[in-house]
Amino acid sequence: MKRRILILLFLFWPPAISFGESCGNFPAPGFDAPEMRHFVGRYRNLNYGFAMTIPKGLTGHDAPTPAPHHGFGVVLSWEPRVYIDFDGSYNANDLSLRETEEKFLGYLRQDSASVQSVSSKAFKLGPLLARRQVVYHTCAGHKDVFVDDQVIALSRDGSITYTAWLMTTTSRYEKDRKLFEKFLRTWKLSNIE
């Protein structure tokens, strides 16, 4: 939930705001607490019209009701913090796919001590055209090199932004990327479009 709010803030607040979420600080401890909504197996988001399968043995979490429900996140490790998140949000600023990708990269640059590399390529999220951006970066106060692997897609009418995000470290990236891709292979549109 907190990340979903931050995504909205990313789109509306001035660039001077920095949240540090890609620096091993997100989500906050307690994200997987019993009072949080939790999801296993087949997941379907009725608000934003997407569905996927959460692999066996993993549990997705989101803020409890009455908080708006945009998607879910899975903590793979608390130390180092490794996190996968899936989100649907309204594209209130009517940004293009490239503009959305650049905005997220701008905030990542702002949070990081240095950005070591950025790769971006065309991708598919379910039936949607998407961009996949992989960023290696360092953060103040951390010795690890972080990897943010993010997929961004827009609904066919451009009204909804879908994001899939893996935040990990270089030492874990190959293993975590395989799990992230397992999620991505099952992502599909459900009741919208």
Image (tube, rainbow, N blue to C red):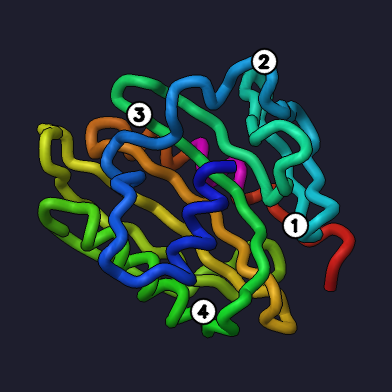
Separation of residues labelled 3 and 2 (CA atoms)? 20 Å
Separation of residues labelled 3 and 1 (CA atoms)? 27 Å
- Going by the numbered disc 3, the residue's amino acid type is Arg
Residue 1 percent coordinates (x, y): 59, 42
Residue on which the image places disc 1: 188
Residue 13 percent coordinates (x, y): 41, 68
The disc placed on residue 97 is: 4
Screen quadrant of the C terminus: bottom right
Q: Residue at x 16, y 44 (%)?
A: 139
Looking at marks 4 and 3 on the same chain, the residue that comes earlier in the sequence is marked by: 3
Question: Which stretch appears magenta?
Answer: 179-183
- In front of the other: label 3 or label 2? 2
Report if the CB atoms under discs 1 and 2 are less than 8 Å apart: no
Please say whether residue 58 is one of the residues in the magenta stretch. Answer: no
Separation of residues labelled 1 and 4 (CA atoms)? 18 Å
Report if the CB atoms under discs 1 and 4 are less than 8 Å apart: no
Please say whether residue 180 is one of the residues in the magenta stretch. Answer: yes
